[in-house]
Image: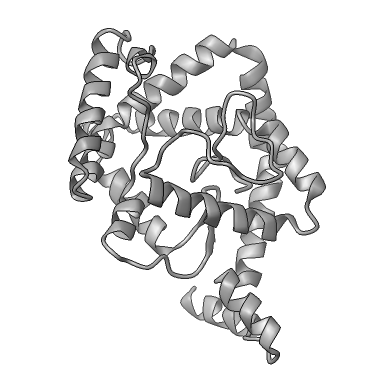
Amino acid sequence: MCAGLLLLGGCAGVPADKPGQDAYYEANDPIEPFNRAIFSLNKGLDAVLFKPAATLYRDALPQTLRDGIRNFLNNLKSPVILANNLLQGDFDAAIVTVSRFTTNTIIGLGGFGNPAGDLGAKFRDEDFGQTLAVWGVGEGPYLVLPIFGPSNPRDTTGLVVDTLIDPVNMWADNTDRGAVQVVRTLVRGLDERSRYLKTLDDLEKSSLDFYVTMRSLYRQLRNDSIRNGGSYDPIPTPSISLDEDEQLLGPRAGLLK
């Protein structure tokens, strides 16, 4: 596998001309042929499986129920967010995370409601990839993962660490309830993909090179998340109109990222 990546990286060698070199280093994508192959695979899977399922999910469930499911999944992630708040030394955010979890769990019927958000305590996502960035770890080269989509070595490491330290995953592993992890991941993916159906369709139609567009968008939004503490508040993205009720394409929102 490593040898294959090196060969592919060689196929996408550094251009000889100065403008080409500048574009090459700015893209930070030395294994572009490999990434494009995985991107095409993900795009195919999305077209035949995930997009139809997300469309059915959106059409079959009312907005209120879908919002409740998203709130519940966000609430479940609170321990991981809190751990990353503390690892980043962001104690104010840690207090908000604890207060949100307590309020939404007790008053919000186990997290399906979001009374904390109504009171002004906005949901702020944090992950170990962001923590590594705060610690000064570089992102490394751009990388497209099967199913999970755009990433890089730093964020891939963060994804693995967050999965391992998640108390829900620990409980599922220790009680032989692995299906809980699978269902949770699938529902999260369906919910996120359903919120960007029109956005991604419009973006693909307007892009000269959809792969390049998604690479650039992912890196911009990821950098904004790191600087802004992972806020789910709107992040202005010129000429891109996102879903009606979501204004941020999350770090792993769907296969096409």
* Left or right of residue 202: residue 158: left
- Residue drawn at x 68%, y 92% as measured from the top left: 16
Quarter-wise, where is residue 36 in the image? bottom right
Q: Position of residue 192 (x, y in %)?
A: 54, 32
Can residue 29 be seen here? no
Where does residue 46 sit, x and y in percent of width and height?
A: 67, 41
Total marks placed: 0
What residue is shown at x 33% (from left), y 33% (from top)? 178
- Asked if residue 204 is positioned above or below residue 170 in the image, the reply reads below
Q: Quadrant of residue 119?
A: top left
Q: In the image, 207: left or right of 75?
A: right
What color scheme is it? one colour
In the rendered view, does 182 fall on the left or right side of 53?
A: left
Q: Above or below — where is 159 with respect to 116?
A: below
Q: Can residue 91 be seen by looking at this rendering?
A: yes
Q: Is residue 174 above or below residue 225?
A: above
Q: Residue at x 66, y 44 (%)?
A: 45
- Residue 91, how many percent across, how many down? 18, 40
The residue positioned 57% from the left and 77% from the top of the image is 25
- For this view, does 10 lie left or right of residue 129? right
